[in-house]
Amino acid sequence: TATAHYGPTHLRTLLARQSLGWSLVGRGEPAAGLAELEPVGEQLRALFGKASFHYGSNLFNRALAYESLGDPRRAIELFREAASAYADSTASATSQVGWAFLNVADILAAQSDHEGARAAYAEVESAWRTSIPEDAPIRVVLYASIARNELALGDLAAAPRNADRSLGLARK
């Protein structure tokens, strides 16, 4: 194991444990995933500080776990903290900022906080403006989500525009 080979606080060990935690969350075991992710997150924060890509990834994965556990408030808090860690890191993590805000927006929209979701979707678009190509498949999902949210807000001028953007990309 990584622990036996490198020791418990080596970056490779921490990243291996982080992968294990993420895998457990993905397998539908969010509580077990958090049991790995939370102590690893504290060690990554101690090693690299709050403004690091590795710490941001840990926060992102923990947010997914809390979302799976039915705690959207905690998930949103951690996704926002992850976006901040990515934005402040020395790594080129602009696309990751967008991914974190996409999750925030989707949670807020599901909770009928459509104004909050609108602001979060705007953060996604801002982050992805230079980091995700305009014709990337994920933008089909983004524009469809924005259109749904705009319909919920009653913005009948903006909703069709984003629905058309989504459909146009999907056809490509």
Image: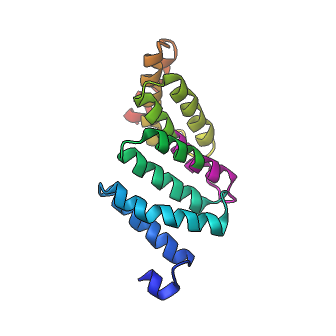
Display coloring: rainbow
> Which residue is drawn at the image coordinates 45% and 72% (left, top)?
16
Question: Residue 95 appears at what percent x and percent y?
Answer: 57, 48
Observer-nearest of 125 and 89:
89
Observer-nearest of 143 and 165:
143
Above-or-below relation of 116 to 15:
above
Residue lying furthest left: 28
Query: Number of marks in the image?
Result: 0
> Which residue is drawn at the image coordinates 63% and 53% (left, top)?
85
Q: Main secondary structure of the magenta part?
A: helix
> Which residue is drawn at the image coordinates 66% and 49% (left, top)?
87
Above-or-below relation of 77 to 169:
below
Q: Quadrant of residue 172?
A: top left
Q: Quadrant of residue 151?
A: top left
Residue lying furthest bottom: 5
Quarter of the N terminus within the rendering: bottom left
Question: Residue 45 appears at what percent x and percent y?
Answer: 62, 63
Q: Is residue 166 visible?
A: no
Above-or-below relation of 114 to 40:
above
Question: Residue 121 appears at what percent x and percent y?
Answer: 54, 32
Q: Residue 98: within the magenta?
A: yes
Q: Is residue 21 visible?
A: yes
Q: Which residues are magenta?
A: 82-101
